Amino acid sequence: MSAVRVLALLTLTACLAGCGGKEDADSRRVVVTGFYPLAWAAERIGGADFRVVNLTPAGAEPHDLELSPRDVAAIRDAHFVVYVGGGFQPALEEAVAARDDASLDVLAAGADPHVWLDAKRFADIALSVGAALGRPAPASRLADELEALDERYRVGLAKCERRTFVTSHAAFATLAKRYGLKELPLAGRSPEAEPSPKKLERLIGDVRDSGATTVFSEPLISKRLVETVARETGATVDVLDPAEGLSQERLAAGEDYFSVMRSNLTGLRRALECR
């Protein structure tokens, strides 16, 4: 009987230890983010002390985000929320307005919500996230990497035959402004917007007048409009990725924000014939 009691006690102790470990893992402070670049930065900065929740599924378009009741509860209870305001993800903005704890709108007073595509500005955002999470050292390291990326873009886009590049929708205005370029988008901030026949004719004329030889598509939206304009202007089609939502396959293959931005720079240099 004594042996049985000892065995039972050992089993109970092991169970409690296992349950305690799970509870400790779940007790990490939660950071909720709107979509991939913000989640990526929060993970780099927060490390093991934080659990980062990305509300936009991998490979999904963040503009289309709809929140479940579980998402709303996660936003309400999170230690910190990082998001882009200005109507980029309206449901998330509404949920943030109803919470009491700290949140960070990375758009601030800017007009173009795609702030992460400006590496210099993204470095400042990283420092703000680090200050809010009490993680200044990793935030500073990430900011240094982003500053180096900014310098790589500045040098790589300094001497080019053309300064105008054509995109499927208006996602790269902030990047263009940073490096003295001009974005010619085929659609506005909503990537699903389809131009009327009259507007399409005008866009084709604008692309011809710009001298662009490349029209950039995006991984998460239809290429139909891009291919139509490219066919009518004799341009080639290439990919410029806003890095809004990498698929699981791409993440598993080791792609991340930095690899996407390096690829974008290569594509821009090729399209603009930079030296």
Image (spheres, grey):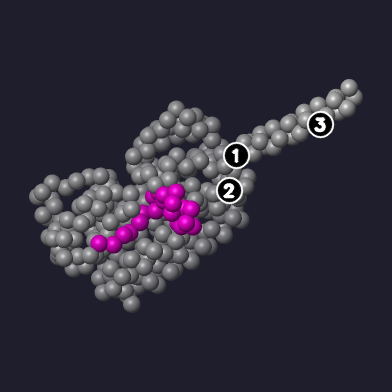
Which residue is situated farthest in the bottom direction here?
A: 275
Report the mark closest to the observer, 2 or 3. 3
Residue contact at pointers 1 and 2, CB within 8 angstroms:
yes
Q: Which residues are magenta?
A: 237-257
Of pointers 3 and 1, the one earlier in the residue sequence: 3
Q: Position of residue 5 (x, y in %)?
A: 85, 24
Residue 115 at least partly seen: no
Q: Which residue is mark 2?
A: 46
Q: Could you tell me how far apart the alpha carbons at marks 1 and 2 are, in whole angstroms?
A: 9 Å
Question: Residue 261: x percent and y percent?
Answer: 41, 61
Instruction: Tell which of 24 and 44 is nearer to you.
Output: 24
Q: Is residue 201 above or below residue 63?
A: below
Q: Quadrant of residue 96?
A: top left
Residue ID at (33%, 70%): 269
Foreground: disc 3 or disc 1: 3
Q: Secondary structure at mark 1?
A: strand
Q: Amino acid at mark 2?
A: Gly
Residue on which disc 1 sits: 29
Q: CA distance from mark 2 to mark 3?
A: 36 Å
